[in-house]
């Protein structure tokens, strides 16, 4: 891991200047030392991790024919839940099994085809030790992930992964802050290794995230978010500019789509074009048609294009635009996609 960047200027202590305040203050130098120390402890983990153990662990999860269950107590439990949720988002059958609830009926969900991964810093957690014989009786394959050598849990599980831990960042070496960090890094990195090994496609990944920005950017097409039919600000090139002001402003697109009698796109006329024309022509604007002042070479997009591609096209040089006419293969206007529409759709 690299070093922390140096501040470009002296520490800004302006918000510490109330000398009469008795509130405790964070020493900026101490804060930097803490981050540098945590970085050192994480480097210790990376430098000493047994990759052969990790490979066996990852391959075992990949070969699973059942569900991969994760369990842990306290902070390790929270990490286990997060790692399980990461796998689920990748389309891998996984779940969190509370060790307490398991002993009160939930262990019934375990079967011989399942894997149970037990996260524990010490490997001596009482709740997990009570869970092991019950899980073995169900026939599940047990893997412990621990940081203390020679612990009880590793001795009774089918396989153990050791996560090297120099010490906790906590001055008392008690609060689990470094140990949970390396658990999370380990679990999520293995998850991405599984993602790669399963050759998960972008479409498959997006299908698991339909409501989020990730999924929307990979699923939504222009045709899904464009304005169409009565929503379109349409006019003919022979229309007078001043006669089309209502159409220009009422549709909320900031432009007019100039079309011919067959609905082919002729060009676009924007509210910016209106201001520039008014400035240049003054009262002469009353005699000008939209076709005389429109942009006859606007950016356009196909309805089958991805919505995220439309956003990229709007932002591309030489200058950004707020909309794109949507044109089919016959050059017929079928819609308009706006930046506001993309943002509103969560993109």
Image (cartoon, helix red, strand yellow):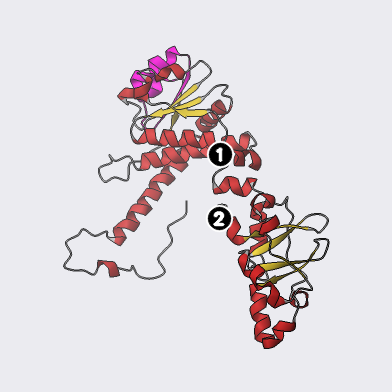
Front-most of 199 and 95?
95
Q: Quadrant of residue 138?
A: top left
Disc number placed over residue 344 in the picture, else none: 2
| For residue 98, above or below residue 233 | above
Residue 150 on the magenta segment: yes
Front-most of 302 and 77?
302
Specify whether 46 is left or right of 59. left
Numbered disc total: 2
Residue 46 on the magenta segment: no
**Place of residue 108 in the rendered image (x, y in percent of width and height, measured from the top left):** 43, 16
- Residue that appears at 81% across and 54% down: 329
**Place of residue 75 in the rendered image (x, y in percent of width and height, measured from the top left):** 35, 36
**Place of residue 296 in the rendered image (x, y in percent of width and height, measured from the top left):** 78, 71
CA neighbours of label 2 inside 10 A, class few (<14), some (14 to 19), many (20+): few
Q: Which residues are magenta?
A: 128-157
* Residue wearing tag 1: 192
């Amino acid at each position: 891991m690299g070093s922390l960047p140096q501040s470009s200027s002296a520490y800004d202590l302006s918000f510490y200047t109330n000398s009469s305040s008795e509130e405790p203050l964070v020493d900026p130098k101490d804060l930097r030392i803490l981050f540098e120390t945590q970085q050192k402890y994480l480097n210790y983990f990376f430098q000493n991790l047994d990759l052969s153990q990790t490979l066996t662990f990852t391959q075992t999860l990949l070969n699973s024919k059942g569900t991969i269950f994760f369990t842990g107590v306290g902070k390790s439990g929270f990490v286990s839940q997060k790692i399980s949720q990461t796998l689920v988002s990748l389309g891998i059958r996984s779940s969190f099994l509370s060790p307490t609830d398991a002993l009160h009926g939930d262990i019934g969900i375990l079967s011989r085809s399942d894997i149970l991964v037990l996260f524990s810093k010490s490997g001596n957690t009482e709740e997990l030790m009570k869970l092991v014989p019950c899980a073995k009786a169900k026939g599940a394959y047990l893997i412990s992930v621990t940081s203390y050598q020679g612990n009880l849990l590793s001795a009774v599980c089918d396989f153990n992964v050791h996560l090297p831990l120099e010490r906790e960042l906590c001055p008392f070496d008690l609060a689990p802050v470094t140990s949970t960090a390396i658990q999370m890094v380990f679990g999520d990195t293995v998850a991405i290794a599984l993602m790669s090994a399963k050759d998960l496609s972008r479409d498959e990944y997006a299908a698991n995230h339909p409501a989020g920005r990730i999924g929307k950017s990979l699923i939504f097409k222009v045709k899904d978010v464009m304005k169409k039919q009565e929503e379109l600000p349409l006019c003919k090139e022979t229309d007078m500019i001043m006669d089309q002001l209502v159409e220009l402003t009422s549709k909320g697109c900031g432009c007019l789509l100039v079309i011919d009698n067959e609905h082919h796109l002729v060009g676009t006329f924007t509210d910016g074009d209106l201001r520039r024309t008014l400035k240049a022509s003054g009262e002469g604007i009353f005699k000008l048609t939209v076709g005389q002042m429109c942009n006859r070479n606007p950016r356009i997009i196909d309805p089958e294009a991805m919505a995220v591609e439309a956003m990229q096209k709007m932002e591309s040089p030489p200058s950004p635009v707020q909309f794109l006419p949507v044109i089919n293969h016959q050059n017929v206007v079928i819609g308009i996609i706006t930046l506001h529409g993309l943002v509103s759709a969560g993109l």
